[in-house]
Amino acid sequence: MTAPPFSLIALADNLGSARLGRLVDSIIAQAAEASRGSADWELVVLRGQYVSSPSWADHPQVRVLPSAATGAAAWNEAIAAARGEYLIPVIPRGGLAPDALTALAAAVVAHPAAEVLYGWEVVGAGEVNGEVDRRPAWSPERLRCQPYLGGLVAYRRSLLEALGGPTDDHPGAQWYDLQLRAAERGAAFQDVPRVLFQRPAGHGDDGGEDRWEWEAGCAAVQAHLDRLGIPAVADLAPTPGIYRIERTAAIADPVSVIIPTRGSSGVVRGEERVFVERAVSSLLNAADDVPLEVVVVYDTATPAVVLENLRAACQDRAALRLIEFGEDFNFSRKCNLGAIAATGRWLLFLNDDVEIITPDFVRHLVAPLLEAGVGATGARLLFEDDTIQHGGVIYRQGDAGHACFGLPDHDPGPGGALLVNRECSGLTAACLAVSRQVFYEAGGFCELLPLNYNDVDLSLKIRATGRRLLWLTEAAAYHYESATREARVERFELDVLRDRWYSPKWDPYLPE
């Protein structure tokens, strides 16, 4: 008999006979409809000694095997018995969507190199009345903070064999641990933008019965970081099912913070302030032991007293370079001149109307840049009223904009996007950290974009080098956007961007 492409594997002891029966009925019904009865799948069920033989055990595509094994040993026994090229572990919470196997089969044809396939979920009463949880494209940083692949994941057999299958190193998180190990191996993860799994509403919302799994997952993340040699501590986040990663790497090389300014003043929360002075003071207070060089690119019209105050603020705390700019306003050119004048290994571009509010802010942004494959990082930026200004760059109908714009700071965002570190399509230049090497390799900021989209262009150039962009939830600052200049978007800039780059209709990391 030809091996089927998909083997679903289940542990009857985990599911219970009634739930397993419903699941098998749904699989048989959808497979019969989709394949017209052809043998394109099989279900392998390991049955413990206390589980009676089910009525559907004689179905030609179902094999029920007696076993005394438990935990990872049981899963590996089921893997060894299965014949399919892709194996799908059946978990106890929820069930397959009506056309899940059909969608997976199409995805395998479209992406023949895929080793791990996952898709969207619907939470609640069906796809019409339930809430669709759209999963992002492959996002390794997000996986460390959230086991986002969901309840239906198909693994290529050869990958499972190479990894040695699930282990009992982290009971309760065996498959999450395996996903992390697959990521370390460089496995090909492929998202399937279709609903593959149906999950009942409310399950696990309070973290009660799932806390042991949550804690097991945290231990798996810590082991993953340790194997990769990433100096970091994984901990439980305030929200169940989410992990916080605190990177602890020492930043020995100087960080050059480049701040374009004209020394403008304004009123924030009833207080008159010079924006660049507040930006620099908040930066110095949030640098901890990271060596800083502050590079201020100032317009000729900047008041002399502002420059004197900056000298006083940086004295004995950071090196200060003042670069005069006498040309017509061009944000990109000012940033590029600042980068040329800077001497640090790391560059942090910061708007003068930013006020940092989290401690150890600079380390949060720079530490991930020490890791292979990370091109740039950005921060969680808030408006004065504590709503989100920047949650990464997102594409909607082909246009780039700020993700989660205007949501309250306490909002978790779609699928918990505001709770986790994650890959994103782009980062704002209002706060962007990058190594000098990557900045120059990407070509710096495009001076044909003097006002807008220069950061989108730089983000795309960095991504074109094969590197990832990370938005970091723990690095937070207020951004009093356009407080120091008139906010306007020029049509010619949009035309330049569109001439240079293809813009996806929908964002891969935050599909809507």
Image (spheres, rainbow, N blue to C red):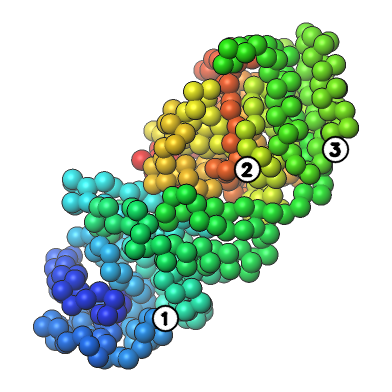
Task: Find residue 70 and report its image quarter.
Answer: bottom left
Amino acid type for the residue under numbered disc 1? Ala
Q: Nearer the viewer, mark 1 or mark 2?
A: 1
- Name the quarter where the C terminus is drawn: top left
* Residue bearing mark 3: 343
* Residue bearing mark 2: 377
Q: Position of residue 397 (x, y in %)?
A: 39, 33
Residue 156 shown left or right of residue 301 in the figure: left
| Camera-side residue of 456 and 276 | 276
Q: Position of residue 65 (x, y in %)?
A: 26, 89
**Is disc 1 in contact with disc 2, using a CB cutoff of under 8 Å?**
no
Residue 462 shown left or right of residue 55 in the figure: right
| Camera-side residue of 98 and 302 | 302
Residue plotted at (41% across, 62% down): 211
* Residue bearing mark 1: 72
Amino acid type for the residue under numbered disc 3? Thr
Residue at the extreme left of the image, as rendered: 55
Q: Earlier in the sequence, mark 3 or mark 2?
A: 3
Q: Position of residue 28 (x, y in %)?
A: 16, 72
